[in-house]
């Protein structure tokens, strides 16, 4: 039996051949220009591929993924992706997309030691504390986890709006930030309707003089 990683290389050849058969200039066009309208900040979970679940082609969505789709204001990786997509690629929409059944959120809800990822998931624990009164009313563990997934996305949207990168863009053009959650069990995306359109949606203390 061949090593499993070799199967990926073989699949790549088949996929590339099919694309060329459909359109001989497919890769030529793809290599010449990248003009995505969307930046997707999603979870690293392998079951949530941005292109597949939105029915989009390569080149249409610029993607950043991390454990539990966190937006952390000190994360230089995320901020670098945000700056490049907003200032260079000129994306029109930034989407924070979580998913129900997120392992990172589940880990954040317990008190076990999960190693290095503890430091990362502490950000979700802080959200849990912030919304403790709301979450404590949900006696079903799954319902509580699902709501924490949603709250994590909502806080991510708000955190993006507080960055100088986004606020500078708002000075000259339209840039919308959306919060979505994907359902693993039905394949559907839920819009949380927490779209942020401009600086007026922020508390005054977060409105930067940029």
Image: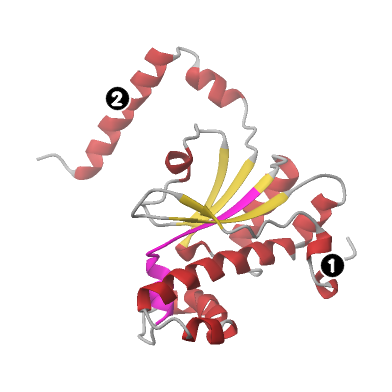
For the N terminus, the image quarter is: top left
For residue 210, side relative to residue 47 (left or right): right
What is the tally of numbered marks visible in this picture? 2
The residue drawn where x is 65% and y is 38% is 37
Say if 134 sits above or below 85 in the image.
below
Say if 72 sits above or below 170 in the image.
below
Q: Is residue 106 magenta?
A: yes
Q: Position of residue 7 (x, y in %)?
A: 23, 37
Q: Position of residue 50 (x, y in %)?
A: 47, 45
The residue drawn where x is 79% and y is 67% is 202
Q: Is residue 82 magenta?
A: no
Mark 2 or mark 1, which has the lower sequence index?
A: 2
The magenta region covers 94-109
Q: Nearer the viewer, residue 186 or 100?
A: 186
The circle drawn on residue 14 is 2
Q: Position of residue 8 (x, y in %)?
A: 28, 38
The residue drawn where x is 40% and y is 65% is 102
Q: Is residue 205 visible?
A: yes
Residue under circle 1?
207
Q: Residue furthest right?
A: 209
Classify mark 1: helix, strand or loop: loop
């Amino acid at each position: 039996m061949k090593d499993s990683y070799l199967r990926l290389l073989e699949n790549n050849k088949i996929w590339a051949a099919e694309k060329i058969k459909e359109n001989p200039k497919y890769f030529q066009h793809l290599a010449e220009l990248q003009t995505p309208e969307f930046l997707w900040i999603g979870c690293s979970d392998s079951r949530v591929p941005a292109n597949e679940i939105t029915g989009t082609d390569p080149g249409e969505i610029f993607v950043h993924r991390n454990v539990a789709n966190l937006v952390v204001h000190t994360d230089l990786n995320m901020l670098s992706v945000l700056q490049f997509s907003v200032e260079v690629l000129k994306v029109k929409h930034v989407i924070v997309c979580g998913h129900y059944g997120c392992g990172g959120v589940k880990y954040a809800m317990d008190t076990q030691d999960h190693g290095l990822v503890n430091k990362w998931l502490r950000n979700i624990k802080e959200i849990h504390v912030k919304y403790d009164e709301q979450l404590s009313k949900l006696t079903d563990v799954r319902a509580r986890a699902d709501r924490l997934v949603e709250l994590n996305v909502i806080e991510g949207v708000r955190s993006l709006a507080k960055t100088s990168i986004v606020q500078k863009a708002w000075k000259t053009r339209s840039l919308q930030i959306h919060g979505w959650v994907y359902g693993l069990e039905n394949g559907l995306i839920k819009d949380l309707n927490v779209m942020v359109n401009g600086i007026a949606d922020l508390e005054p203390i977060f409105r930067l003089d940029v």
